[in-house]
Image (spheres, rainbow, N blue to C red):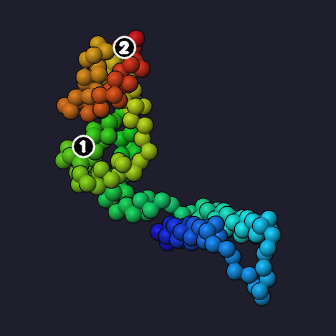
Amino acid sequence: MTNSINFVVGLSIANHLFQRIAEKPRPLKSGVRLDNPVEAYASKEQDMKKVLNWIGIVLIGSIVLGAAPTWAQSLTGPQSNAVRSAKQYLSFSGFSRNGLIHQLSSDAGDGYKVADATVAVDSLDIDWNKQAVRSAKQYLSFSGFSCKGLIEQLASSAGDGYTKSQATYGAQQTSACQ
């Protein structure tokens, strides 16, 4: 968490410095005046390059130090465990977002609180269309479906709970709709 905070503070400071350089003339030491506009522009450009260089150092430093997104470090114990469970489920079967949350939170499933299951699922980078294709192929592996019937099964709240567009996409990638 400290690395993430340092990163955000660093970017805020860099942004502030960049704006100050761009907006205001730079005070000069010992009464030196810049009468030449090209010289004044070059001075601002050099200052901006320094700030941009500093931003790059902050970014690289944060990466090297392992700064993670704030949400990744703020998961509670149950949420982290729910993430592990979700990954296990996804490793062997296709799930919709709603279906996965239900599996993680139901008494017949893992029994996590709905809020913890939701945070866990939303913290993962899941291609729901790809999951719909997996589910559609799994249905066809043990039963026959028309294209319309497969879409309805995938989109049904009693079925998988995909959105209509995800269900349509998933079904259209199978032999049922071709």
Quarter of the view holding residue 129: top left
Residues packed near mark 2 inside 10 Å, few (<14), some (14 to 19) or many (20 plus): some
Task: Say which mark, if any, is on residue 46.
Answer: none
Quadrant in which the C terminus is drawn: top left
**Residue beneath disc 1:** 102
Residues packed near mark 1 inside 10 Å, few (<14), some (14 to 19) or many (20 plus): many
Task: Say which mark, if any, is on residue 177.
Answer: 2
Quarter of the view holding residue 101: top left
Amino acid type for the residue under numbered disc 2:
Cys
- Circle 1 sits in a helix, a strand or a loop, which is it? helix
Is residue 80 in sight in this rendering? yes
In this rendering, the answer to whether 14 lies above or below 107 is below
Instruction: Report whether 23 appears left or right of 44.
Output: left
Q: Position of residue 107 (x, y in %)?
A: 18, 47
Depth check: give the residue in front, 163 or 157: 163
Q: Which residue is drawn at the image coordinates 36% and 33% (left, top)?
A: 94
